[in-house]
Image (cartoon, rainbow, N blue to C red):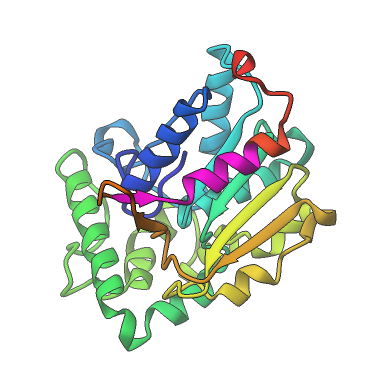
């Protein structure tokens, strides 16, 4: 299960997915992407969305640990894009047997346009502050070239990517990085089944952007659009009055329907 930008393996939707999988008898692996979740000292490079091969490395480690197949990548937001990107670019060599993607950030240019709408100021500020805090945590461990990481110098995600992410990943500028990182043009390369869940009221990933890919990759891609859910916010109150992440159930329902032979003894 893969979190989004600025998240971690402890995010509620990540834990909810893992909990539902465990409840049904599956193994569950929660991933911290580079520099996320307190891992600043564990990587010599900055995080970027083109590091989707890291997910392949996780799957390889699962193979070496003899965890039973099938292996399904489940991701939200940027993590969903990375899951799709890994499987699409790997093609027939994919170690993932399927992908379940929630609100995937498949087109960075569209998302940049949408997140700069005035109504998304709070989202934008939250991302910028989170990225700056993450970079400053890394700088407490090792030097990172670039200006001070604060809102005086970094006022947008593009600013952060221009100063830090793109050059660290070997790109000339943010545009080149965004072109390489998005999976929109690569979805037809998928050779494993993929289910994409999104919401009509996602504030910065238009549902139409995602829905256009229903049936891609020779029918391997299925898209479902919920009326509500925001950006990976698929929550309702349970009978006990506590919020419940309802997307975990259809995710596991789809996985079990896709792999009906994977009984609990083989998970």
**Who's the residue at 44% across and 80% down the image?**
114
- Is residue 190 something one can see in this rendering? yes
* In the depicted structure, whether residue 100 falls above or below residue 203: above
Viewer-proximal residue among 10 and 132: 10
Give percent across and percent down for residue 238. 33, 50
Residues drawn in magenta: 243-255
Residue drawn at x 65%, y 20% as measured from the top left: 263
Q: What's the magenta bit mostly, secondary-structure-wise?
A: helix
Camera-side residue: 177 or 88?
A: 88
Where 261 sits versus 185, above or below?
Answer: above
Depth check: 34 or 258 in front?
A: 258
Instruction: Please state the total of marks drawn on the protein image.
Output: 0
Q: In the displayed structure, would residue 72 be above or below residue 262?
A: below
Q: Where is residue 163 in the image (x, y as percent from the top left)?
A: 33, 65
Horizontal and vertical percent position of residue 247: 48, 51
Residue shown at the point (36%, 57%) measured from the top left = 236
Residue at the location (38% across, 60% down)? 233
* Residue 242 is one of the magenta-drawn residues: no
The image quadrant where one finds the C terminus is top right
Residue 33 appears in the picture as rendered: no
56 is higher (above) or lower (below) than 266:
below
Magenta stretch contains residue 246: yes
């Amino acid at each position: 299960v893969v979190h989004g930008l600025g998240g971690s393996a402890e995010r509620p939707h990540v834990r909810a997915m893992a909990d539902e999988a465990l409840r049904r008898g599956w193994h569950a692996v929660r991933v911290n992407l580079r520099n996320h979740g307190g891992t600043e000292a564990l990587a010599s490079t900055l995080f970027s969305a083109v590091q989707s091969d890291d997910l392949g490395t996780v799957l390889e480690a699962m193979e070496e640990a003899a965890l039973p197949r099938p292996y399904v990548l489940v991701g939200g937001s940027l993590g969903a894009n990375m899951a799709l990107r890994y499987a699409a670019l790997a093609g027939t060599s994919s170690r993932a047997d399927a992908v379940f993607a929630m609100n995937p950030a498949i087109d960075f240019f569209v998302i940049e346009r949408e997140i700069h709408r005035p109504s998304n100021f709070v989202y934008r500020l939250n991302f910028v502050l989170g990225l700056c805090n993450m970079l400053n945590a890394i700088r407490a461990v090792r030097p990172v070239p670039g200006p001070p990481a604060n809102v005086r110098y970094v006022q947008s995600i593009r600013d952060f990517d221009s100063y830090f992410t793109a050059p660290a990943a070997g790109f000339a500028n943010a545009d080149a990085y965004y072109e390489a990182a998005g999976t929109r043009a690569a979805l037809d390369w998928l050779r494993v089944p993929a289910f994409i869940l999104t919401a009509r009221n996602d504030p910065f990933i238009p549902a139409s952007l995602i829905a256009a890919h229903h049936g891609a990759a020779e029918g391997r891609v299925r898209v479902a659009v919920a009326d509500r859910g925001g950006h990976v916010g698929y929550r309702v109150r349970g009978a006990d009055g506590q919020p419940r992440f309802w997307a975990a159930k259809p995710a596991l329902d789809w996985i079990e329907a896709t792999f009906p032979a994977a009984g609990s003894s083989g998970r």
